[in-house]
């Protein structure tokens, strides 16, 4: 089922349980679709177990029985958490494609008692969430929605992908398993026919996506955690995991220790104020760029392969600056 249809069904459900009766024409106008589509949606709601009544004389529909979306009595803390998250994540600098979260927060607030609403408005203005820089993914929302729809219907898609690793466009049939947001962008994970393996694709680099009618099944034991293994971020590399030991100087040691960078990390302070940071990762490339960001305040002790990788990159970087010109 597409994202658009799911949203429309929720809107239709809200109209039907409002306590007023509606004819097909008014429902079609409210939901911005044809009468024919409304009849199909009503039939789907009936099949899903929603109890609907139809007045033959008035030609109007009503919902009988218990409301499916009842009002919720939020505590101040609960309402504040929901409003802040929806407002910040749905804002202009929030998570791409989640602008509706901001309007949802406004609707939620409008239904609260006046005293609580005023109190929450003051509190939400005092709280702000600064998210890290992210790709705005302008023009990619249709791609995102088609991926969600494909997973919902378990149908393959054809991707035209601008691959950095392969130096150009790759065209592949993809069986999408998961769509997830991580740090700066949305990603889709699924089995690619060209690569004959499960791969990760950045939604920002999908140039075109075509829905297909080919059915597939997500492996029953597949999970994002199992697929990523102990990757530092997104890209698990082939071969056994590596145990990494990095020694941070006192200037940055506390900042590093205060953050949960990875699920396997262990941090130990030494008598001289340095920090020994241990982690087990599935591949060294991603963590190498993180270490380089700390410059001379971080030294890789183990493994030798990561030391050699950083030494080579540091030498090239030093040579670039020693030239004195770009």
Image (cartoon, rainbow, N blue to C red):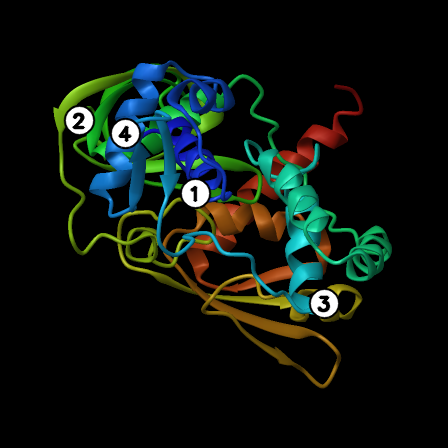
User: Circle 2: is it few (<14), some (14-19), or many (20+) Cα within 10 Å?
Assistant: some
Q: Nearer the viewer, mark 1 or mark 3?
A: 3
Mark number for residue 150?
4
Categorize mark 1 by other alpha carbons within 10 Å: few (<14), some (14-19), many (20+): few
Q: In front here: 313 or 172?
A: 172
The one nearer the camera, 42 or 244, is: 42
CA separation in Å, label 1 and label 3: 30 Å
Q: Marks 1 and 3: CB-CB under 8 Å?
A: no
Seen at 50% across and 63% down, the residue is 262
Q: Is 46 in front, or is 205? A: 46
**How many residues crowd around disc 3 within 10 Å: few (fewer than 14), some, or many (20 or more)?**
few
Q: Secondary structure at mark 2?
A: loop
Q: Is residue 248 visible?
A: no
Give the x, y percent position of residue 68: 41, 52
List the residue tagged with mark 1.
180
Q: Nearer the viewer, residue 13 or 92?
A: 13
Camera-nearest label, 2 or 1: 1
Q: Position of residue 54 (x, y in %)?
A: 30, 34
Whether residue 173 sits left or right of residue 19 in the image: it is left
Q: Earlier in the sequence, mark 1 or mark 3?
A: 3
């Amino acid at each position: 089922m597409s994202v658009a249809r799911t949203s429309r069904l929720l809107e239709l459900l809200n109209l039907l349980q409002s306590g007023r009766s509606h004819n097909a024409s008014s429902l079609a106008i409210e939901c911005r679709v044809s009468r024919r589509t409304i009849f199909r949606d009503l039939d789907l709601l009936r099949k899903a177990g929603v109890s609907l009544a139809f007045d033959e004389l008035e030609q109007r529909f009503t919902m009988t029985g218990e409301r499916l979306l009842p009002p919720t009595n939020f505590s101040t803390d609960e309402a504040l958490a929901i409003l802040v998250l929806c407002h910040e994540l749905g804002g202009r600098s929030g998570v791409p494609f989640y602008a509706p979260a901001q309007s949802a927060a406004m609707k939620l607030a409008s239904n609260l008692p006046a005293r609580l609403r005023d109190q929450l408005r003051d509190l939400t203005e005092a709280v702000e969430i600064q998210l890290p820089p992210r790709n705005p993914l302008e023009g990619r929302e249709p791609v995102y929605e088609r991926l969600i729809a494909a997973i919902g219907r378990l149908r393959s898609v054809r991707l035209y992908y601008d691959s950095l690793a392969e130096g150009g466009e790759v065209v592949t049939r993809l069986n999408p398993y998961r769509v997830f947001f991580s740090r700066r962008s949305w990603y889709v994970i699924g089995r690619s026919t060209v690569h004959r393996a499960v791969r990760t694709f950045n939604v920002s680099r999908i140039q075109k996506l075509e829905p297909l009618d080919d059915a597939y099944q997500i492996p029953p034991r597949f999970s994002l955690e199992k697929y990523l293994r102990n990757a530092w971020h997104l890209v698990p590399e082939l071969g056994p995991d590596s145990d990494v030991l990095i020694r941070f100087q006192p200037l940055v040691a506390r900042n590093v220790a205060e953050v949960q960078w990875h699920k396997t990390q262990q941090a130990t302070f030494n008598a001289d104020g340095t920090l020994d940071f241990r982690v087990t990762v599935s591949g060294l490339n991603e963590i190498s760029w993180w270490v380089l960001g700390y410059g001379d305040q971080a030294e890789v002790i183990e493994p030798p392969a990561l030391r050699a990788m950083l030494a080579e990159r540091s030498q090239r970087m030093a040579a670039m600056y020693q030239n004195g010109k770009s």
